Amino acid sequence: MKVVDFLIKVRDILYTNKVTSYIFSLFMRLVLFASIVSIMVYKGAKILGYNIIKPFFTTIEIFTISVIALEFIINYTTFFAVLIKKKEYSFKAFLNQALNTLFLANIVAMIPFYVLPYPYTLLVVLARLLQFGRFSKKIMELLNVIKSSFYELTWFFAIFAFFLLVSSISIYMAESPYNPAFRSLFNAFWWSIVTATTVGYGDIVPITQTGKIIASFLMIFGIVSIAMLTSIITSAFTRRIIESKLDKEALVQKKIDELVNHYIICGFGKITSLVAQQLRSNNLSFVIIEKDRDKANEAIKEGYLTINADAADEKVLLQAGIMRAKGLAILTNSDAENLYILISAKELNKEIFSIARVNARENEEEAIKRFKRLGATTISPYHTSATRVARMILAPNAADALFSIAGAKEAIEIDEIRIPKNSPYDGKMIKQTNIRSFYNLMIIALVEEFFNKNEQKIEKKLKFNPSGDDIISSSTILICVGLTQDLQRFKRDLGSA
């Protein structure tokens, strides 16, 4: 079994792992492309009568065949190892593998081109082109699309071949007594293909009335056939695009379902983009909900988990994991929309921490009151900007200090840290702790939370600039200022990170 496990591991490296399989497929494509070019150069030079350095081309050919043969052996031995591991032994499994890896093309691709006379060399070139396609993801996707319509295409080509046969025999019988060009069935078949595909070379044309009637019907049949074939392939591609989209959405939903204590951001714009960057830099999980398709696609391009839907819909909020989420940021450009989202969210999860953006320039205070009544913390871009400008006018040095902290090379942050039960800090005064001396953190505020018998939060009190005699308890949240790494170190040691 050790050999089987080793072979399965090799298969995973070469054909499954995203990075290593890409490198391997790129190597195979380069080898096959180089061999095809060398064959074309060799044959072209020989036809034109140029002197050829045969050992050079022979070396390339030997190397190419060795690589193809080695890949062939690895592919099938590792495939059989997988079957042995799964205990699945069936001819159908082997047949599927042979079809997927183009078994016959693989065999032909291992034939040295110089042992075959022209034009049979083209078979080797064609086989290697097919192998090149096997290692190209886009070409394989195209083949899979065609494969998905195999049933429809089989019926189409069966009917098409039948009509070609009928038209070939008919035109042969109608024209051969009077037209020398149709005195062989091969020429009649050639004419049928050229006419049905609407190519119309004009090298062979019917001259009898019966022949022209047959040609007319065949032309109409050809146009209808091309339309049908186009329809089959187009519907296959459309189906594949829809399936691909559904697969991506299912993958995103699976990732969202695995999130716990994450954040939900409603609306995607400049503010959301900056918020998302900050959350990502702090390794925090979040989901973006955006109903505008273009904005949602922009968020997806940035690599964010995104749901393209209306955040006011309770089903969408549940899909985003509102019951497991730690916080909700509502940042759309519409106060009415933000209010609807907040109402929907609070109906599902009353305890969730919520931040809502207030966009109103007029009656801003009324808008803020509405959001606060629903338990949301509010932010106003206009109010924040005005406050910042006023601070710079009234206290420029203090403002410079604050802004220099925000733009410091070493990230300085304000963070909240909850003291867990049975913590070494539980019941101690601030001056008795090592938070300042060991962790280099400054406590700028204490938040005391009060709960009822059912452990529901009923009240909280905030105290700024606490003294050293203030006592820390398990119901205390510390508001600390310090370097990011110091905050993370303290949270990690505390067990609340």
Image (spheres, helix red, strand yellow):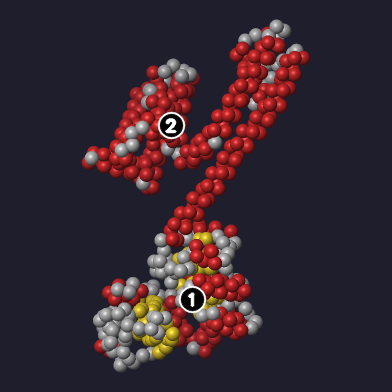
Nearer to me, 12 or 163? 163
Indicate which disc, 2 or 1, sits on the residue closer to the N terminus. Answer: 2
Residue at position x 36%, y 24% from top?
Answer: 58
Residue 333 numbered mark, or none: none
Residue at position x 57%, y 66% from top?
Answer: 313
The residue lying furthest to the front in this view is: 453
Q: Dividing the image into 4 quarters, which one contains the N terminus?
A: top left
Say which amino acid is labelled 2.
Leu
Residue 417, percent from left and from top: 36, 78
Left or right of 409 on screen, residue 432: left
The answer to whether residue 465 is visible is: yes
Tell me which corner region of the image, top left, top right, bottom left or bottom right, holds residue 334. bottom right
Q: Mark 2 — residue?
A: 99
Left or right of 340 on screen, residue 258: left
Count of numbered badges drawn on the protein: 2
Residue at position x 50%, y 65% from top?
Answer: 318
Tell me which corner region of the image, top left, top right, bottom left or bottom right, holds residue 373. bottom right
Q: Mark 1 — residue?
A: 350
Residue at position x 42%, y 38% from top?
Answer: 135
Q: Residues within 10 Å of mark 2 (few under 14, many from 20)?
A: few
Say which amino acid is labelled 1.
Lys
Residue 377, percent from left and from top: 51, 80
Nearer to me, 200 or 116? 200
Q: Is residue 464 above or below residue 204?
A: below
Q: At numbered mark 2, what does the secondary structure look like: helix, strand or loop?
A: helix
